[in-house]
Amino acid sequence: MLWWLWLIIALVFVVVIMFIYYYNKFVLLGNRIDNSLSQIDVQLQKRADLVPNLVKTVQGYAKHERKIMQAVTDARKAFLGATDIKGKLKAGNEMQNALKSIFAIAENYPQLRANENFLQLQQELAAIEDKVAYARQFYNDSILSYNNGVKVFPGAMFASMYGMKEKEYLKIPTEAKAVPKVDFDEE
């Protein structure tokens, strides 16, 4: 009869360990998601900090491209004014599109393309864009791990007990995928 008692104690112990394991798993995956979202925010802020220098450099060469310069400045203001990560991501995408327009302008100004400040800023922005892309990928990979834990048995059972639900992936808006239209009309 003593072996039944030990069996029950062992089963209770295994169940308690599973509850602890899955709770900790979901907490760790949630923290990884939060961290990766913060990394995206950091890289977007770095990009926003470089924009004024880039605009000043380009303005010296392309004075009549005021609309595009204003679009970049407005996108930066929108980013800095955003209070939540979704707003920052949206404004970051707008800023990315505006920056593409600036680089398209540079194609028409050989002296600008040869400018050392412009080249350095362009390289820094390219490096930041790579980091943003990596951070977005890491975020989505973290979401994948979390969602797998929430959907796959036995994690699904524990996720429902803890009230954990699937999370959404970061998606690039359709307008951010479009090639920017650059209009060289002089004002």
Image (cartoon, helix red, strand yellow):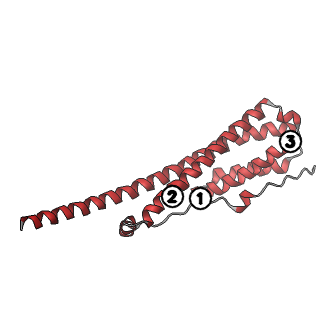
Amino acid type indicated by mark 2? Ile
**Residue at image x 10%, y 64%?**
3
Q: How would you rate the neighbour count of disc 2 (Cα within 10 Å): few for under 14, some for 14-19, many for 20 or more?
A: many
Return the disc, 2 or 3, that comes first in the chain's sequence: 3
Q: Position of residue 103 (x, y in %)?
A: 80, 44
Q: Secondary structure at mark 2?
A: helix
Q: Nearer the viewer, residue 34 or 77?
A: 34
Which of the 4 image quadrants contains residue 108?
top right
Q: Nearer the viewer, residue 11 or 84?
A: 11
- Report the side of 98 relative to 7 (left or right): right
To which residue does mark 2 refer?
Answer: 143
- Report the side of 157 relative to 138 (left or right): left
User: What whole-number distance in Å separates the C-alpha atoms at marks 1 and 2?
Assistant: 9 Å
To which residue does mark 3 refer?
Answer: 107
Which residue lies most toward the left here?
A: 1
**Residue at image x 86%, y 37%?**
61
Q: Secondary structure at mark 1?
A: loop
Q: Position of residue 24 (x, y in %)?
A: 35, 55
Q: How would you rate the neighbour count of disc 1 (Cα within 10 Å): few for under 14, some for 14-19, many for 20 or more?
A: some
Return the disc, 1 or 3, that comes first in the chain's sequence: 3
Q: Quadrant of the N terminus?
A: bottom left
Amino acid type indicated by mark 3? Glu
User: What whole-number distance in Å separates the C-alpha atoms at marks 1 and 3?
Assistant: 32 Å
Q: Nearer the viewer, residue 100 or 82?
A: 100
The disc label shown at residue 170, or none:
1
